[in-house]
Image (cartoon, rainbow, N blue to C red):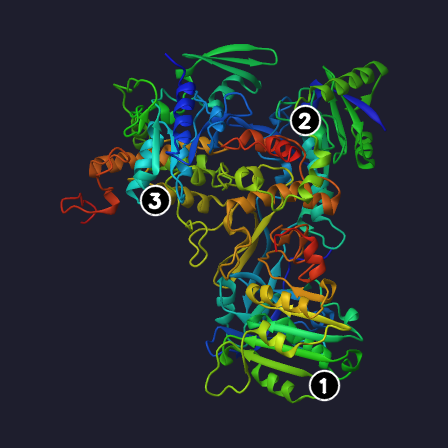
Amino acid sequence: MPDTSVMIRDTAKKLLDEKRVDLIIGFERGTLPLCSSPCFTRRSEEAERLIWNASCENNLAKYLRRREEKVGIVAKGCDIRSIIGLIKEQQIDREQVFIIGVPCNGMIDRRKIEAKLDGKEILEAEEEDETVILKGRDFTEAIKKEEFLHNSCKTCNHRNPVIYDVLIGDKVEENQGFDEYKEVKEFEAQSADRRWQSFTNEVSKCIRCYACRNACPLCYCQECFVDSSQPQWIGKTTNLSDTSIFHIVRAFHTAGRCVDCGACERACPMGIDIRKLTKKIEKDVKELFHYEAGVSLEDIPPLATFNPDDPQEFIK
Amino acid sequence: MKNLYLPLAMRAEKIVIETEDKNIKTFSLSFLNKEDGSSFNYLPGQFAQLSVLGKGEAPFGIASSPTQPGELEFTVNKVGVVTVALHNLEEGEIIGIRGPLGSCFPIEAFEGKNIVIIGGGFAFTTLHSLIRYILYQENRSRFGNVIVIYGARSPGLLLYKDELKQWEARPDLDLHLTVDKADDGWRGKVGVVPNVIKEVAPSSENAYAIVCGPPIMIKFTLPVLRDLGFLPERIVLSLEMKMKCGIGMCGRCNIGNKYVCKEGPIFTLAHLNELSGEY
Amino acid sequence: MKEMKIAKNEVVSFLDSLIREYKVFAPVKRDSFVVFQEIHSGSEALLDYANSKKPPKEIFFPQSEVMFAYSLHGEGLGIEEPAFEEKPRVIFGIRPCDARSLVILDDIFNSEMYKDVYYIDKREKTLVIATGCNQPNSTCFCTSLGGGPFSRDGSDLLLVDIGQEYVVQAVTEKGEQFLKKHSEFKDVDEHSLSLMRNVIETAGALIKSKVETEEIKEKLDRMFDDPFWDLVHEKCLGCAICTYLCPTCHCFDIADEATDHRGKRIRIWDSCAFPMFTLEASGVNPRPTNKERTRQRIMHKFKYFVDNHGMAACVGCGRCIKECPVNLDIRAVLNSILNR
């Protein structure tokens, strides 16, 4: 089977040569092992840089808005669901985007591997099918990819692109027979005090860098609520109360829109479990409105509409 | 070591509405502690950070002149959190001040020269300070001819209207007022400031030009001055940028390798031309 | 320069004794990463670590710091400064790159014209004990910026790991006085000194990542309008990770928090990467897009700061490289600039 990277490159070159797109956003090799980086190519020769591997973890849909040109984008299942969200929120036109869909078996979490190596630096990494060979100053270790996937990849049930203009390679098997809300349910089962304790422990690490917000393709407000000064909603210090409100409100702003791509969690330098809340809200939306974000171009997001028989237990 | 971040207390003695849209007010402030007043030594062009405690702090050019001891005047345009809070103050209320900060107009360099002062809109505040300083009895003879060209969008938006009338009557000052759009009562010039400068054609010989105004006015004024023969070293500008600390540490107000709060806000065009294209 | 030694197995008890007299900050393991924190027992300190996640600048320049409390009343304005440090402080185990960043921060907060009391108070009351790097990381490029794995800039004492012991170099007078007062430090023999020299020489060669930074400023002098900036910012998310985790970044915001007529004025880290950083109340923004802001970061660190202080505002610690979510590697940017 031809290499996915080669297939992506060929597709990209063809699209650029034929001028069907002005720009292709994909991934190129990063400057660190197990790391790739978003890449913007506008000419066929540049497309030679495009790669695909288990470190292509960024959600490139972030870069689609506010463009005049026609854009090709290398996207995995979660990224495409974000694109669907952006189309439905009228942030991009379907015709403007050429989706190069890539079926995905999950992306590797570099931090989990670093934690396992307990501080030993990885100097080289080589992917081979199901394993990754890691080399350091005085060690070589082989690890199984599936043991070190990002948390959002472990609960992913849309490994194949929901929509696409071209599909790279063959579809992969979807994750079956697992409960994607297992951790949420465990969390729900705890007492309110325990939950609050656990939540504040997490967000106390927050340095308010807003990488989570900036990495999210669906956070695109001209003026984010944290920056508003008239009125000012939250303080700018790392006071726990303000930080907690930031995370809580941001989670609520994603209700019915978040596709759980995990970009927020991956971007966070402090390793905060940002999906703790968003996954719970996603579950609530599913239960209350029977809606899953980013799987259909036609259905209307539940917070953008109402139904006479929407649940209303909160009205007593 | 003095803590440069602590504001001194001032009382808003008098608050006067300057413009017909009520968006600009002039505040006369006095120090609660008289000693603070005697150590607040400033020159025209400098600014101070005014605090409405609880709301925030912002930089304002000092509109009064050091030749009038006792009170400091600031003219404030209502546009954001701090300025809205200032506008909501009543006479007698207390605010904080830190200053004087920044560089002043190069008064020594102006001595013996003709002075051409060009102002637009509400950027006229520090020019007001400079003009009062120059016109002050003991100072006037240090300087040559003084021409002032000041314009606003409409007559109601001119600042310091009463004082302008007094200045019009003075023989030792050549004042030209202009508006973009006149009203029924207006008897002065009509036209944008750059055009009025062309008309007045002040001589650049042995002269300095000082320009304060909105970016668009400056953009069209500089070529006119160049054509009149003013060299970049003889054109003085006052820049504005968002500021927080006012003492060159928070990093916000830098233009190239200069800080507007520290090396500025007063710069000559020659200085600015050396800096990168950021301004 | 005075040199002494301390046995590794005595460091914990040494720190315990310090804690009785000083406020001691040391690298501590928190979850899966390392931070500098006040320790209450010597065993909390991590002796063997690469570098901390957040830079130790926060020990001198905290992320949130109360500048003063105030109360407004009819007769005036009451201002209350925060309590300044009472106990002397020691920061132990800081890396030479981070120690060097203090020299850069000193230039800003302790300039001739203006002095920042909050920073200076902490800085003057802190003894800096740095630990050199026997095994630099692949992302370290300190030697390209005038530093090195055993650079002494910014520290009072420098520890060199020679196996069972550390050789301690007294860098400043303050450091030398400190050595005299603590009996854990013993006289050092020639054998240990030669081991030390060996370690230092080897480590320098272990820094693989190099950027020819001497010519960067000259290039940048002419590059303000270069189309280079149109592309380099494209993948940047505009978050504050690189600025907050950078040991030399010092930009801050000032905010008032109040209830009725009492309140506090607080300063907090801010980032030139945020669009609001230069946004004026009128709505005008001199740096309206990511392009201008990315250009500003690079120009400030490698040209403007050099213009004003003679050194780049970067110590080559590599944190921005490791933590950037989109792998915008500053070394790659600098190399691209060199190749223009």
Q: For this view, does A299 lie left or right of residue A105?
A: left
Considering every residue shown, the one lying at the far front of the view is: A18
Percent position (x, y) of residue B206? 78, 73
Q: Secondary structure at mark 1?
A: loop
Percent position (x, y) of residue C294? 56, 42
Amino acid tagged 2 = Lys
Q: For this view, does B113 lie left or right of residue A289?
A: right
Residue C105 shows which numbered tag? none
Tell me which chain the residue with mark 2 is part of. Answer: C
Residue A91 shows which numbered tag? 3
Q: Are marks 3 and 2 in contact (CB under 8 Å)?
A: no
Q: Please give the name of the residue rendered at 56% of the width and 37% of the height, measured from the top-left corner.
A: C242
Tell me which chain the residue with mark 3 is part of. Answer: A
Query: Mark 2 = which residue?
Result: C210
Amino acid tagged 1 = Asp
State whether discs 1 and 3 lie on one chain: no
Placement of C42 over or under A281, stated as above or below: above
Placement of C31 over or under A2, stated as above or below: below
Query: Mark 1 = which residue?
Result: B172
Compute the Cα span from label 3 to label 2: 42 Å
Compute the Cα span from label 1 to label 3: 62 Å
Q: Nearer the viewer, residue A15 or C312?
A: A15
Q: Please give the name of the residue rendered at 73% of the width and 35% of the height, measured from the top-left corner.
A: C214
State whether discs 3 and 2 lie on one chain: no
Quadrant where the C terminus of chain C sits is: top right
Tell me which chain the residue with mark 1 is part of. Answer: B
Compute the Cα span from label 1 to label 2: 66 Å
Amino acid tagged 3 = Gln
Q: Secondary structure at mark 2?
A: loop
Percent position (x, y) of residue C182? 78, 29
Q: Residues within 10 Å of mark 3 (few under 14, many from 20)?
A: some
